[in-house]
Image (tube, grey):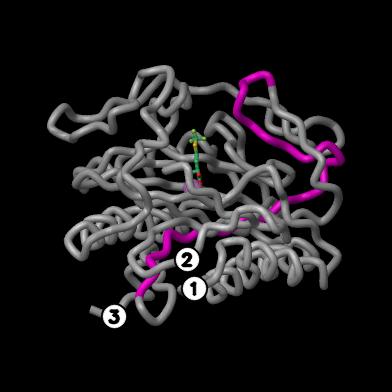
Amino acid sequence: MPKDSQGLLVPGIVSPRRTVPHHIPRPEYVDRAEPNEPDGTGDFYSPEELERVRAASQIAADCLEYLEQFVVPGVTTDRLDELAHNFLIERDAYPSTLGYRGFMKSCCTSLNECICHGIPDSTVLESGDILNIDVTAYFNGMHGDTNRMYAVGTIDTESQQLIDVAHEAMMRGIRAAKPGREVNVIGRVIEKYAGRFGYESVRDYTGHGVGRAFHSGLIIPHYDTDRFTDVIEPGMVFTVEPMLVTGSQDWRSWDDGWTIVTKDGSRCAQFEHTIYIGEDGPEILTLPASQRNG
Ligand code: MF3
Ligand code: CO
Ligand code: CO
């Protein structure tokens, strides 16, 4: 079911929609064709709002950490979606992707040559696979968005290097996000680092403002460009989420309208954090419990 004869992905079976208890507040866009985004409320957050984005971000980050023990050969991406869904609703968070522009699962599961937006389904993980899980939690009126890679069983050294470089590229992009610079500095640093290893940084999917809206309208490029000149200032919240590929970044979309895969079948790795810009520089809001103090 999950792979064709060359080991490339094919669509699996998508399970019925999971339900969310009625007491959990839903984002405005759920089950509407178009969100009210960009919502026009900008990318700046008061101290009180920051604490609410932080709470949503920590739930999403803790969910990714919780899932680690379950990402093993033999598990389906649908089972991982069920575990993510239950983790979020048990904490009174709404899974932001569920009902977003017609996406009907509680996380994205992007395997091997999938760049992003993979839909959890009956695909069975095998040793040697690399998987990205992207979780966004909506809690107390705020979205927190994060993703990371998981190695399934034993992976080859090339895949491990791709994962390590993608993580370091994200961290370098985050550290470059200092007040007074334009947001395009982030992409410049990321693409430059990826290039040292011969990897391309995907241009067509970007970071974004997040918090009151899932995608605020602010765009954070992951490549070197003179466009995207918004100045980074204290009080801002946005994501940094580079996707690096070992081959060509040319992509195609599956008929499901979501799944984005490399045309050449080369593998992709991505990491994502939601960050806050303080007076002195960036702070990562989506650190999991094991990496937080207090
Ligand atoms: N969480 C993804 C991001 O980082 C967005 C997923 S939208 C979905 O922006 F509809 F595909 F779930
Ligand atoms: Co995001
Ligand atoms: Co995300």
Give how far apart the Cα atoms at labels 2 and 1 are.
Answer: 6 Å
**Mark number for residue 180?**
1
Examine the rendered structure and indicate whether residue 63 appears above or below residue 94. Answer: below
Examine the rendered structure and indicate whether residue 152 appears above or below residue 175. Answer: above
Whether the residues at callouts 1 and 3 have beta carbons within 8 Å, the answer is no
N-terminal label among 2 and 1? 1
Residue drawn at 62 percent across, 21 percent down: 256
Question: Label 3 belongs to which residue?
Answer: 293
User: In which image quadrant can residue 92 be found?
Assistant: top left
Q: Position of residue 28 (x, y in %)?
A: 28, 28
Whether the residues at callouts 2 and 1 have beta carbons within 8 Å, the answer is yes
Q: Residues within 10 Å of mark 3 (few under 14, many from 20)?
A: few
**Amino acid type, residue under disc 3 in the picture:** Asn
Give how far apart the Cα atoms at labels 2 and 3 are.
Answer: 26 Å
| Nearer to the camera, 246 or 27 | 27
Q: Residues within 10 Å of mark 1 (few under 14, many from 20)?
A: few
User: Where the C terminus falls, by quadrant?
Assistant: bottom left
**Mark number for residue 276?**
none
Residue drawn at 42 percent across, 28 percent down: 100
N-terminal label among 2 and 3? 2
Give how far apart the Cα atoms at labels 1 and 3 are.
Answer: 28 Å
Taking the magenta stretch, the answer to whether it contains residue 261 is yes
In the displayed structure image, the side of residue 119 where residue 20 appears, left or right: left
From which residue to which does the magenta span run? 255-278
In the displayed structure image, the side of residue 209 where residue 124 appears, left or right: right
In the structure shown, which secondary structural element does the residue marked by tag 2 occupy? loop
Question: Label 2 belongs to which residue?
Answer: 232
| Nearer to the camera, 223 or 230 | 230
Examine the rendered structure and indicate whether residue 269 appears above or below residue 258. Answer: below
| Nearer to the camera, 168 or 35 | 35
**Amino acid type, residue under disc 2 in the picture:** Ile
